[in-house]
Image: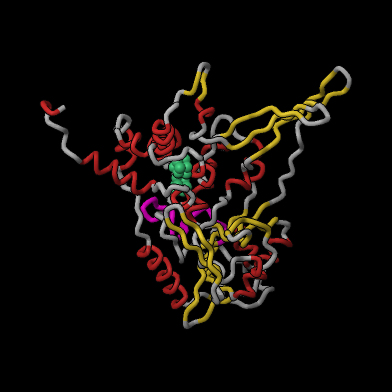
């Protein structure tokens, strides 16, 4: 561990080192990232929600804000609080940074009787994501499996994602909708970051315990005035994470993948469909849903533009084959979504498609809760088989 408050320190910080920054130190870290030509993007407050946007100093962060989330409900509340990360997750995930909701694929430009096909140039400035939650970093890992590690990678995703600098903010204020602990994705960060922040505010003052996760994370942090992390700082971080874990009441049953694999004919799907509006909110806010569709549109100049937009398994067209939709009922569409997320994703990508962020619970207009539904399927699976004569 390096102990210094001298910016000209000769010893660079290394992975595994732990230091403490003041809020001024955090501002210096943001400046150092910007000076290293990173576009720094992080949580900001806009339109009464915590959403992602450019961050040039800590005053752009949601200082003093907390969020209130429950099934079908999201609110932000401003308090007299110096903390920057006293909230859980907002409606927008980092998915949109690498996989925008709408992208032009190509356009055919008319000139007389001929058309010329033009592919848009896409710039990929180096991106630093600042204040991502551990579950969100896990979600990026899931998207990587889908969009960059298969046979056919998505070129724009790969290019935007390639040099990503990750500053994770460990979670000290989970929402009531969070269940990352049961998914193994939070509230602490174990890997996938360059720097990990834990915000502490106690008798020892307001500060950030910062763990180094990579060589380049250590190199950037080495340029910033910092102090050695004391044993009290380390204990305070542990306590922050323990408190976060104990406040999380929702959980995902551990055997849900196998349960859903054997629940294809359950009457529960129709029962859920009586409540579900097929609005697709749950898929749009989900940080791992990756389905897309393509449409051809025209503009007033006569150009034809092929656009790719996010799609959803709740959309009837999503399963349209010649003659009609394969999943015509709401129950079959919810079954597709939930079973893919929690069960067949394992077969396809050797991972869960859910990281426990709870967004689909908060943003479902009728308050359908994936953890509650999973618990009911688990309960059904434990019931004894009915007697043959009663079947
Ligand atoms: S399924 Fe729901 S809780 Fe799981 S990652 Fe998606 S939005 Fe988050
Ligand atoms: S589960 Fe909720 S958010 Fe998802 S499609 Fe149905 S009503 Fe919309």
Q: How many marks?
A: 0
Tell me residue 342's x, y (percent): 39, 40
> Residue at the location (35% across, 55% down)?
250
> Horizontally, is 70 left or right of 261 in the view?
right
Q: Nearer the viewer, residue 191 or 361?
A: 361
- On whether residue 162 falls in the magenta region, the answer is no
Tell me residue 296's x, y (percent): 69, 27
Q: Nearer the viewer, residue 290 or 323?
A: 323
- On whether residue 192 falls in the magenta region, the answer is yes
Tell me residue 350's x, y (percent): 42, 38
Q: From the viewer's perspective, is residue 109 above or below residue 279?
A: above
Q: From the viewer's perspective, is residue 323 above or below residue 70?
A: above
Determine if residue 353 is in view.
Answer: no
Residue at the bottom extreme of this rendering: 203
> Residue at the location (51% across, 74% down)?
229
Which span is picked out in magenta?
180-195
């Amino acid at each position: 561990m390096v102990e210094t408050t001298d910016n000209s320190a000769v010893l660079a910080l290394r992975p595994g080192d732990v230091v403490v920054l003041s809020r001024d130190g955090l501002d210096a870290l943001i400046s150092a990232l910007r000076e290293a030509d990173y576009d720094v993007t992080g949580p900001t407050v806009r339109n009464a929600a915590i959403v992602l946007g450019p961050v040039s100093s800590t005053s752009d962060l949601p200082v003093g804000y907390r969020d209130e989330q429950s099934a079908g409900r999201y609110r932000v509340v401003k308090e007299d609080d110096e903390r920057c990360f006293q909230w859980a997750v907002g409606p927008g995930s980092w998915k949109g940074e690498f996989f925008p909701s709408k992208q032009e694929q190509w356009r055919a430009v008319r000139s007389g009787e001929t058309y010329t096909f033009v592919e848009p140039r896409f710039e990929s400035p180096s991106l630093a994501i600042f204040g991502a939650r551990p579950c969100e970093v896990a979600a990026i890992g899931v998207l990587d499996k889908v969009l960059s590690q298969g046979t056919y990678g998505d070129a724009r995703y790969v290019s935007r994602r390639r040099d990503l600098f990750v500053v994770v903010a460990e979670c000290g204020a989970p929402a009531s909708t969070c269940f990352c602990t049961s998914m193994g994705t939070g509230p602490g960060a174990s890997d996938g970051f360059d720097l990990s922040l834990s915000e502490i505010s106690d008798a020892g003052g307001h500060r950030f315990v910062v763990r180094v996760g990579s060589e380049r994370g250590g190199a950037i942090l080495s340029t910033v005035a910092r102090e050695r992390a004391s044993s009290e700082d380390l204990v305070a971080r542990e306590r922050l994470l323990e408190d976060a874990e104990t406040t999380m009441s929702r959980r995902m049953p551990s055997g849900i993948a196998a349960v859903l694999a054997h629940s294809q004919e359950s009457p529960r799907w129709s029962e859920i469909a009586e409540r579900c509006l097929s609005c697709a909110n749950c898929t749009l806010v989900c940080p791992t849903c990756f389905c897309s569709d393509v449409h051809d549109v025209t503009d007033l100049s006569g150009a034809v533009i092929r656009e790719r937009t996010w799609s959803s398994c709740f959309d009837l067209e999503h399963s349209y084959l010649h003659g009609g939709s394969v999943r015509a009922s709401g129950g079959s569409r919810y079954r597709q979504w939930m079973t893919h997320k929690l069960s067949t994703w394992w077969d396809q990508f050797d991972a869960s498609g859910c990281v426990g962020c709870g967004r689909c619970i908060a943003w479902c207009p009728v308050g359908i809760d994936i953890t509650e539904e999973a618990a009911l399927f688990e309960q059904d699976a434990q019931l004894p088989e009915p007697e043959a004569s009663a079947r």
